[in-house]
Image: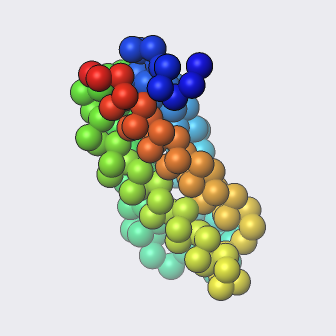
Amino acid sequence: MGVNEMGPNTGVTLARRVFTVAGWYGLVTLVPLYFMESRVGRDFPPPITHPEHYYGFVGVALAWQVLFLIMARDPVRYRVVMIPATLEKLSWSAACIALYMQGRLSSVVLGTGLLDLILAVLFVASYRAIARTGR
């Protein structure tokens, strides 16, 4: 089925799947960070000197994951929120790519940035697909 031949629910189904996967992936990867502050400081030196920034980042990122799961329930209603959701993914992926190119980021962390870049592309695809459903 081509892009112009999408059924009326294809865009909604895509968005539901994309945002459900994004939300659960984020929860699974971020919740453990609450218990790994010292390990993160050892594995990716230097040690964390401002824990409020670390926990603040984790908390804000977790809030977005919950929002993704809410969006997955009714993507048509929350279509406009896909714009800042995409910016959230792009801000992390762009920072990771730029820092990696400067030699300031490990390839492991770059991988998470690239996954977020893929999710950003899927968020845009979901946004556009819902527009094509005419809903």
- Residue at the (59%, 69%) spot, across then down: 96
Q: In this view, does 89 lie above or below 40?
A: above
* Residue 60 shown left or right of residue 114 in the figure: left
Name the image quarter holding the C terminus: top left
Q: How many labels does the image show?
A: 0
Q: Position of residue 115 (x, y in %)?
A: 63, 51
Q: Where is residue 124 in the image (x, y as percent from the top left)?
A: 44, 44
| Res 73 → quadrant | top left
Q: Can residue 28 be seen in this view?
A: yes
Color encoding of the figure: rainbow
Q: Nearer the viewer, residue 82 or 46?
A: 82
- Residue at the (60%, 78%) spot, across then down: 99
Q: In this view, does 76 lie above or below 22?
A: above
* Residue 66 shown left or right of residue 18 in the figure: left
Q: Which of 92 and 29 is in front in this view?
A: 92
- Residue at the (48%, 39%) spot, across then down: 125
| Res 82 → quadrant | top left
Q: Which of 131 and 68 is in front in this view?
A: 131
- Residue at the (64%, 57%) spot, across then down: 114
Most distant residue in the bottom direction: 102
Q: Where is residue 15 in the image (x, y as percent from the top left)?
A: 44, 29
Q: In this view, does 95 lie above or below 130?
A: below
Q: Where is residue 21 in the image (x, y as percent from the top left)?
A: 55, 31
Q: Can residue 30 be seen in this view?
A: no
Name the image quarter holding the N terminus: top right
